[in-house]
Amino acid sequence: MTRKQARDTAFKLIYQMQIQKENSDFILDLYHGQYLCQPGAKEYIDNVVNGVFENKNEIDAQISKLLEGWKLERISKISYAAIRLSVYEIVYRSDIPDSVSINEAVQLAKKYEGEQAANFVNGVLAALIKQREGAK
């Protein structure tokens, strides 16, 4: 499983957590009970899904600050999962370049929701990078 495929899986599991309102342990146990992952992919998926769940309040607070005239509740669950995943990678994982994380989130939004969603995700994540650069 490539990193891109692992990210796609993590995205789907983050989306699933939003829909089912379950914790990350439950979602990951269910997933790993059905699918076998290579160790590197499993480590990445587990880290990202648990990380988003454990830091959900901080991630959502950051996203809220980036939304101009929007509330979190208005964001589609697909875009929301892609944004949460990317924000986690940007803020908590130094091994993934910001540009890669943003590009992958945009591609996920485009694949599962369409061009308009991809543009929205890109705008939110670009604002995060701009905000982080201004804080340096």
Image (cartoon, grey):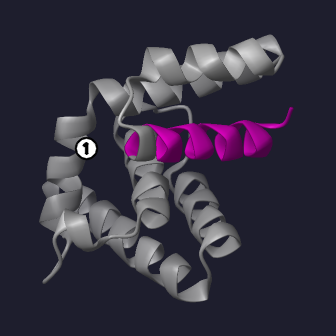
Depth check, front residue: 112 or 60:
112
Please give the count of numbered marks on the rendered protein: 1
Depth check, front residue: 114 or 1:
114
Disc 1 crowd rating (10 Å Cα; few below 14, some 14-19, many 20+) is: many
Residue 53 rendering spot, x and y as whole percentages? 35, 29
Residue 79 rendering spot, x and y as whole percentages? 45, 65
Question: Left or right of 30: which side holds 47?
Answer: left
- SS of the residue under disc 1: helix
Q: Residue 47, relative to residue 3: is it above or below?
A: above
Main SS class of the magenta portion in the image: helix
Q: Residue extending furthest bottom?
A: 116
- Residue at (26, 36) in percent of width and height: 56
Q: Which residue is mark 1?
A: 59
Residue 30 rendering spot, x and y as whole percentages? 62, 19
Depth check, front residue: 19 or 92:
19
Q: Residue extending furthest front?
A: 20
